[in-house]
């Protein structure tokens, strides 16, 4: 049938196999298949996760063993670490780039680029995204952004060194940092990445709105899809703010404009307002999909419907909406009007509520369940327990007087890593191990996966829990050598302990990496539905064919009908048709 | 919008067949509306920054007309509005299956749009020659950033419009399927609307 | 893991530390309750042969209860914090007759300007000292923060005070030391390559010692 533009899903005959064989290039490199694009994002993001982790290792070497030559440090140029000893200017670039790579090139694409792409069409019953070619463009635009960001390490003056938050005027004055090209590359890279994200987001939104299979009402969507959908809206609306801010920063640096420099009336605080107006929705972008995956996996692992599905949806919406009103809590000490501080404090306290609802509902899901401790379930449960810590620690900094003391200390670093690593990254491990069989048609080795989990969980807490104490003792962030201060000298032992835990944590990730790569080739062949899950993706082969479904599925129920009395098995796929029931038992929407 | 013609088996300008009720519009149109949401936020950042800086430091701006050529830009604004009219006429033409009308009105839109950009470039060159450059205080910084990115968006719009015109000449649009025309039209109207806001707050205040 | 705060030496420390400990208790209880519940459920409801999970979709009443409790708890914490915030950072909170100083932050030091014997800043008898803040005990001090270049942040952990110094702005921060002794100033906002060594020292003197120091134009004529 004739279609002239990209095959908008409803207009291609689903189930029609491609009569022609595509070249390797069209099939795997410049693919418009959302599943391939998702895997492309996966490979790219895991590479950048490694980069971010390596940067963290150098940071921890300096903090754990200050002034000592780093093993293997000889490979670094003298501008970074002569004789393997880290320089202070390189240290500032390290902390900047660790944050930048982790936030923008690892966690965000892992959550949104990988699983948004992979799961959305499959879980809603669509053959692909609404705009497959734009989807391909979204990936291939992200790649040069990543290359540019790496390039910043080799330019003169070194990489951006003003923090991932790039506060002006430091970030725009090469005379204050010694960095010029690095910061410019940082700016351009993120503008390009922003375009990639925005292209992805409007694709996801259109797809979820318009391409849900018949019977897939809004309140039958899996929470992973709700989360990804709402996250896509946040990306759509928040990333352009960052782009605008970075453009102004870039123009200050290169065209001599005066947005943020006070010399001619510019305002440094304007940068902070713009950045955090983007930045706070950004952190919800970094956690909502993780929460969605946790819900899907915990329900499956517990063999029970999600507790309070509707509340979970409303909590996602509440977090997304309220998240726009709290940005000032990053700026309590900034010199902003204190009355504004009070209003941001109240809104920040309130946003704890929907997150708490979700935690209680995850607990409620496990309660009364029949818990299977498969690898994804382990990571999902770890997500909940670590997110509890991260969320609770946030309450300390929400209280403005307490924040006076802990702002810009390691207490904040502890909090952010508990939500981003303890939260997001464990959820990512859960999601990867859960959907790996679907993606690659192979099972990851469960024994080594569990070894990876245990070591990671223990080492992770060894790294980040003591950071609370460091912060409470007043240990500031982004400090090359805390021993300059008498009041911090007694904390060296803790810093060394953290660093050693970090090295163990990093090393343990190789278990995951080897398991990931090896299983792709020699892992046990995966059945269609290894986890006895109800989602639509598990009704097709592992991996699914191009076009996903032979015919558009018909959906009869929500995704969490585990242990239903209507059937003998403890799961009931969304598209399984049952004979008409005599007394319609509380039929769930 | 009315579907004037009989529904074909695959009505390309209806929501995807066989799926749950979404927003009731076809994918490309929904996609463009959603994308325009991101554009609103982008211009909000630039315009918001301008408002904050100007309210805090009003003396950094010259009175209207002293630096900028308001009459010329007013004419230019009128032209851009005309191009939205020609765009509407192009869309109406293809809704009725009038291919000749479509081509004519699309060409008009391209020419006027390109003309708008040309006048902007001409104005920039003049301003810079008299020393009003981006680094000229807050005034120059905000003026060039806002109008420059708007001009960039118009240019992208003109390029897309040329592409749509080319496709029109290749007979790719019909009353039954003119999605490209409608979608590029939506973008064009948005760009026009942003300009009306910018013209008011940058040139007239 | 030590959850205790180091000793405080200002009038703010009491209020801030108290708030911290209240939050510690509240979050501590929440932490224990939820984590114990989590572990308990995982053990109690682990899969056993022949036992089916409950087909249970939720409990609205329970949700209303725990949502309300959480909302009330955080709101109360917020309201408790609001008073302290106003007292410490409120624009009108600076006590009259506070001793004024200017703290001018720059890469990578603190330039502190004291009023001369006329106790007015901005007059000819002001004097400037690098990296040394001398103050009298039990008196309110009002520091005006300015910056030469980047954003810095004036942080004295013992006093529980922190305030960013922003170029182009004059920002007040006041405090009242309650103990004599030596303390440290740290910079708490990344400000460039020397950020980590932007250390200053604070000496809190008795009233008489401070008068002597001040009359001598900031000379360390008195013994260390």
Image (tube, rainbow, N blue to C red):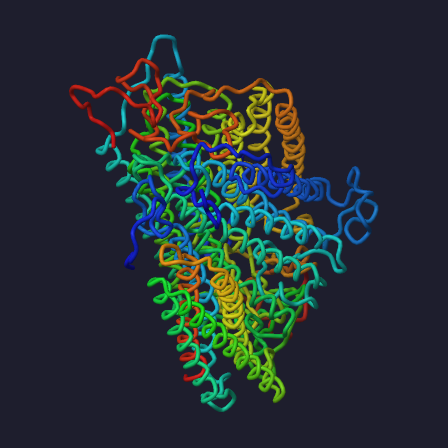
Q: Is residue A574 left or right of residue A40?
A: left
Q: Residue at x 48, y 24 (%)?
A: A541
- Residue A82 picture location, percent across and down: 82, 49
Which of A296/C68 is in front? Answer: A296
Q: Where is residue B124, by image quadrant?
A: bottom right
User: Is A169 situated above or below A438?
Assistant: below
Q: Where is residue B64, by image quadrant?
A: bottom left
Q: Residue at x 73, y 56 (%)?
A: A158
- Residue A412 picture location, percent across and down: 52, 47
Q: What quarter of the picture does the N terminus of chain C occupy?
A: top right
- Residue A380 picture location, percent across and down: 46, 29
Q: Residue furthest bottom?
A: B66
Q: What quarter of the picture does the C terminus of chain C occupy?
A: bottom right
Q: Is residue A156 left or right of residue C55?
A: right
Q: Is residue C175 visible?
A: no
Q: Residue furthest top?
A: C50
Q: Is residue B91 left or right of residue A413?
A: left
User: Is B131 situated above or below A520?
Assistant: below
Which of A92/C195 is in front? Answer: A92
Q: Residue at x 26, y 17 (%)?
A: A565
Q: Is residue B88 visible?
A: yes
- Residue C100 picture location, percent across and down: 51, 72
Q: Residue furthest left?
A: A583
């Amino acid at each position: 049938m004739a279609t002239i533009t990209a095959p908008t899903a409803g207009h291609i005959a689903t189930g029609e196999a491609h009569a022609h064989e595509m070249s390797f290039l069209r099939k795997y490199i410049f693919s418009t298949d959302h599943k391939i694009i998702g895997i492309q994002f996966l490979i790219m993001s895991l590479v950048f996760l490694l980069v971010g982790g390596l940067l963290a290792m150098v940071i921890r070497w300096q903090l754990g063993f200050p002034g000592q030559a780093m093993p293997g440090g000889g490979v670094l140029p003298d501008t970074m670490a002569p004789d393997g000893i880290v320089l202070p200017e390189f240290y500032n670039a390290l902390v900047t780039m660790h944050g930048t790579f982790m936030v923008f090139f690892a966690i965000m694409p892992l959550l949104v680029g990988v699983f948004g792409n992979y799961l959305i069409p499959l879980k809603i019953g669509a053959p692909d995204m609404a705009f497959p070619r734009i989807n391909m463009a979204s990936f291939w635009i992200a790649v040069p952004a990543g290359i540019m960001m790496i390039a910043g390490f080799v330019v003169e003056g070194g990489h951006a060194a003003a923090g991932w938050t790039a506060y002006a005027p430091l970030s725009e004055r090469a005379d204050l940092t010694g960095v010029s090209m690095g910061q410019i590359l940082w700016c351009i890279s993120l503008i390009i990445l922003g375009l990639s994200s925005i292209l992805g987001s409007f694709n996801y939104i259109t797809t979820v709105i318009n391409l849900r299979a018949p019977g897939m009402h809004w309140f039958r969507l899996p929470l992973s899809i709700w989360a990804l959908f709402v996250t896509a809206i946040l990306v759509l609306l928040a990333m352009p703010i960052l782009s605008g801010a970075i453009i102004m920063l870039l123009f200050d640096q290169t065209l001599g404009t005066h947005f943020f420099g006070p010399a001619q009336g510019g305002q440094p605080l304007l940068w902070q307002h713009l950045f955090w107006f983007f930045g706070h929705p950004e952190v919800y972008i970094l956690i909502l999909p993780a929460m969605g995956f946790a819900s899907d996996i915990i329900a499956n692992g517990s063999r029970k419907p999600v507790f309070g599905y509707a509340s979970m949806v409303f909590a996602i919406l509440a977090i997304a909406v309220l998240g726009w009103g709290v940005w000032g809590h990053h700026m309590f000490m900034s010199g902003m009007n204190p009355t504004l501080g009070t209003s941001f404090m109240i809104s920040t306290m309130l946003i704890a509520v929907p997150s708490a609802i979700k935690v209680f509902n995850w607990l409620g899901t496990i309660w009364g369940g029949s818990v299977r401790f498969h690898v994804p379930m382990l990571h999902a449960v770890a997500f909940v327990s670590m997110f509890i810590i991260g969320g609770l620690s946030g309450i300390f900094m929400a209280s403005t007087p307490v924040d006076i003391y802990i702002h810009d200390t390691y207490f904040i670093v502890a909090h952010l890593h508990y939500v981003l690593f303890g939260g997001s990254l464990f959820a990512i491990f859960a999601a990867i191990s859960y959907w790996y069989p679907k993606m690659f048609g192979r099972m990851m080795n469960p024994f080594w996966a569990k070894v990876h989990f245990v070591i990671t969980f223990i080492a992770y807490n060894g790294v980040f829990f003591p950071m609370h104490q460091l912060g409470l003792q007043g240990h500031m962030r982004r400090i090359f050598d805390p021993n300059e201060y008498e009041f911090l000298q007694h904390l060296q032992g803790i810093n060394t302990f953290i660093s050693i835990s970090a090295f163990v944590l990093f090393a343990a990730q190789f278990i995951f990496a080897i398991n990931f790569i090896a299983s792709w080739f020699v892992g046990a062949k995966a059945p269609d539905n290894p986890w006895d899950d109800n989602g639509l993706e598990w009704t097709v082969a592992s991996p699914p064919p191009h076009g996903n479904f032979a015919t558009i599925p018909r959906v009869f129920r929500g995704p969490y009908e585990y242990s239903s009395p209507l059937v003998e098995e403890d799961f009931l796929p969304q598209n399984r048709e049952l004979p008409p029931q005599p007394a319609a038992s509380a039929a769930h929407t | 919008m009315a579907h004037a013609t009989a529904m074909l088996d695959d009505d390309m300008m209806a929501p995807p067949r066989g799926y749950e009720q979404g927003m009731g519009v076809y994918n490309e149109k929904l996609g463009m509306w959603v994308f325009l949401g991101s554009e609103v936020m982008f211009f909000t950042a630039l315009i918001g920054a301008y408002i904050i800086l100007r309210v805090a430091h009003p003396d950094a701006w010259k009175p209207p007309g002293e630096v900028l050529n308001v009459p010329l830009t007013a004419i230019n604004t009128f032209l851009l509005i005309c191009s939205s009219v020609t765009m509407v006429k192009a869309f109406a033409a293809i809704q009725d299956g009038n291919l000749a009308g479509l081509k004519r009105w699309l060409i008009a839109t391209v020419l006027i749009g390109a003309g708008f950009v040309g006048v902007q470039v001409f104005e920039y060159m003049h301003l810079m020659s008299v020393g009003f450059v981006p680094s000229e205080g807050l005034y120059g910084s905000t003026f060039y950033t806002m109008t420059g990115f708007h001009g960039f968006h118009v240019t992208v719009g003109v390029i897309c419009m040329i592409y749509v015109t080319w496709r029109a000449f290749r007979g790719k649009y019909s009353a039954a399927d003119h999605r490209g025309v409608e979608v590029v039209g939506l973008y064009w109207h948005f760009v026009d609307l942003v300009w009306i806001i910018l013209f008011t707050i940058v040139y007239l205040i | 893991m030590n959850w205790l705060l180091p000793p405080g030496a200002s009038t703010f420390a009491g209020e801030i530390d108290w708030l911290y400990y209240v939050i510690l208790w509240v979050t501590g209880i929440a932490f224990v309750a939820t984590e114990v519940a989590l572990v308990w459920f995982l053990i109690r409801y682990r899969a056993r042969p022949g036992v089916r999970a409950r087909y249970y979709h939720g409990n609205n009443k329970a949700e209303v209860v725990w949502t309300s409790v959480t909302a009330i708890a955080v709101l109360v914490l917020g309201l408790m914090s609001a008073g302290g915030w106003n007292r410490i950072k409120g624009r009108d909170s600076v006590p009259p007759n506070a001793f004024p100083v200017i703290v001018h932050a720059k890469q990578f030091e603190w330039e502190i300007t004291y009023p001369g014997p006329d106790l007015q800043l901005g007059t000819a008898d002001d004097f400037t000292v690098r990296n040394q803040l001398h103050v009298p005990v039990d008196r309110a001090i009002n520091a005006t923060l300015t910056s030469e270049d980047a954003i810095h942040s004036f942080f004295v952990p013992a006093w529980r005070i922190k305030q960013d110094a922003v170029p182009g702005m004059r920002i007040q921060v006041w405090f009242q030391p309650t103990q004599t002794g030596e303390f440290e100033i740290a910079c708490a906002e990344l400000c460039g390559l020397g950020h980590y060594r932007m250390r200053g020292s604070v000496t809190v003197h008795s009233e008489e010692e401070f008068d002597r120091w001040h009359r001598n134009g900031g000379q360390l004529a008195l013994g260390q």
